[in-house]
Image: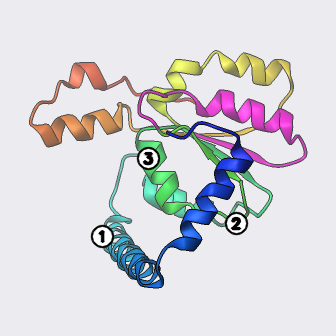
């Protein structure tokens, strides 16, 4: 890490960058372009795969199809706050942001249940903007008491619960690793509406 005055530190970093030989800068640009192309290729493969499975049945609603349709509902002023775990990759991958700084997340897997409290803060900070809180059923179960806060403060929030009756990301990983304890990750069918 670096320690020091931010302005002075940035000046020093800029000096170092400017001193780099042109050949080194060119090499970096080529490496970056290769990396960006690799990411684009990966994204295309995932999108191709999801387009194949998008019409499969997933209980009530296909979550990939739902998030893709959500793109038609948001505008450049909509603030979307999403939870970690399965909801994180669904929203991060399939929701196309339409404004700068409008998608908020706490994606570390230990942060289950953060979307609703963060959405309350976003709504209080930007009351005239549409705020969408996207969460999973497991995460929502951890903060369901915050509905009292939403009601008491009369906050018009749209709360989307992606309900698969389980801790989906943990289920996926347990199955991938060859051990699956359904009693520890599956829930009863709860109607949150």
Q: Position of residue 166 (x, y in %)?
A: 35, 31
Q: Which residue is mark 1?
A: 49
Q: Secondary structure at mark 2?
A: loop
Residue 74 is situated, as x and y percent measured from the top left of the image, at 71, 60
In the drawing, what numbered circle is on residue 41?
A: none
What's the residue at 49%, 28% (across, down)?
A: 111
Q: Which residue is mark 2?
A: 98
| Residue bounds of the magenta highlight | 108-134
> What residue is disc 3 on?
60
Q: CA distance from mark 2 to mark 1?
A: 24 Å
Q: Residue 48: where, in percent of width, then height?
A: 33, 75
Question: In the image, is residue 47 part of the stretch drawn in magenta?
Answer: no
Disc 3, disc 2: CB below 8 Å? no
Q: Is residue 4 above or below residue 152?
A: below
Q: Is residue 114 magenta?
A: yes
Q: Secondary structure at mark 1?
A: helix
Answer yes or no: is residue 139 visible.
yes
Quarter-of-image position of residue 57: bottom left
């Amino acid at each position: 890490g670096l320690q020091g005055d931010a302005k002075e530190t940035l000046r020093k970093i800029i000096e170092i960058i400017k001193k780099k030989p042109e050949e080194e800068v060119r090499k970096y640009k080529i490496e970056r372009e290769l990396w960006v192309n690799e990411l684009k290729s990966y994204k295309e493969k995932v999108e191709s795969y999801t387009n194949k499975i998008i019409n499969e049945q997933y209980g009530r609603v296909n979550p990939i199809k739902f998030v893709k349709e959500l793109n038609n509902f948001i505008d450049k002023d909509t603030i979307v706050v999403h939870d970690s775990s399965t909801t994180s990759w669904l929203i991060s991958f399939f929701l196309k942001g339409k404004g700068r700084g409008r998608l908020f997340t706490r994606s570390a897997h230990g942060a289950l249940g953060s979307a609703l409290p963060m959405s309350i803060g976003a709504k209080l900070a930007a009351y005239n903007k549409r705020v969408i809180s996207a969460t999973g059923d497991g995460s929502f179960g951890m903060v369901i008491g915050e509905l009292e806060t939403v009601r008491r403060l009369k906050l018009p929030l749209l709360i989307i619960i992606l309900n698969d009756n389980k801790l989906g990301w943990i289920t996926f990983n347990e199955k991938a690793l060859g051990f699956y304890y359904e009693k520890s990750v599956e829930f009863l069918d709860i109607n949150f509406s």
